[in-house]
Image: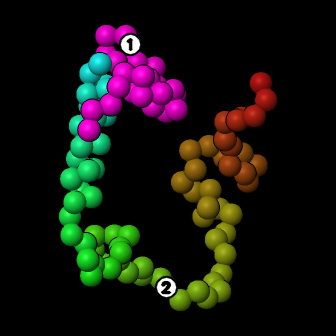
Amino acid sequence: MAITREQAEHVTRLARLEIAEAGRERFARQIGAVLEYVETLGQVDTEGVAPTFHAIDLINAYREDRETGHLERDESLANAPLAEAGFFVVPKVVGG
């Protein structure tokens, strides 16, 4: 499915992509090729095929939720790159 240059530019605006003038025609061709492939998928007979979210069956391995003891402060700080007065020292991430 060929798309026009204007349609390709509309897609780039929606996706907030900046594409140089020289690459716009190529981008339009590539988007067109993707749409053609999607069209071929639409031609596949899916009658009787149940919808699925994953190609393979997934099983979550949950452990029993039970109360346990807490980690002592010294144990939790043992592998910290930097600790001070019993606390983790981390870079400031707000303000300036």
Q: Give how far across and how far down residue 33 sits, in percent.
A: 23, 37
Say which residue label 1 marks.
Answer: 20
Q: Is residue 82 left or right of residue 31?
A: right
The residue under the point 25% across, 72% down is 46
First in residue order: circle 1 vs circle 2: 1
Mark 1–mark 2 distance (CA, rounded to whole Å): 52 Å
The magenta stretch spans which residues? 1-24
Label 1 Cα crowd, 10 Å radius (few <14 / some 14-19 / many 20+): few
Q: Which mark is residue 49?
A: none
Query: Dot 2 corresponds to which residue?
Result: 63
Q: Going by the image, does 15 lie left or right of 38?
A: right
In the displayed structure image, the side of residue 50 where residue 13 appears, left or right: right
Q: Is residue 81 visible?
A: yes
- Residue farthest to the top, as pictured: 22
Give the number of callouts: 2
The residue at 62%/56% (across/down) is 77
Q: What amino acid type is highlighted by mark number 1?
A: Ala
Q: Secondary structure at mark 2?
A: loop
Residue 49 x, y percent position in the rendering = 27, 78
Q: Amino acid at mark 2?
A: Arg
| Quadrant in which the C terminus appears | top right
Q: Residue at x 38, y 70 (%)?
A: 53
Residue 86: % across, % down: 73, 54
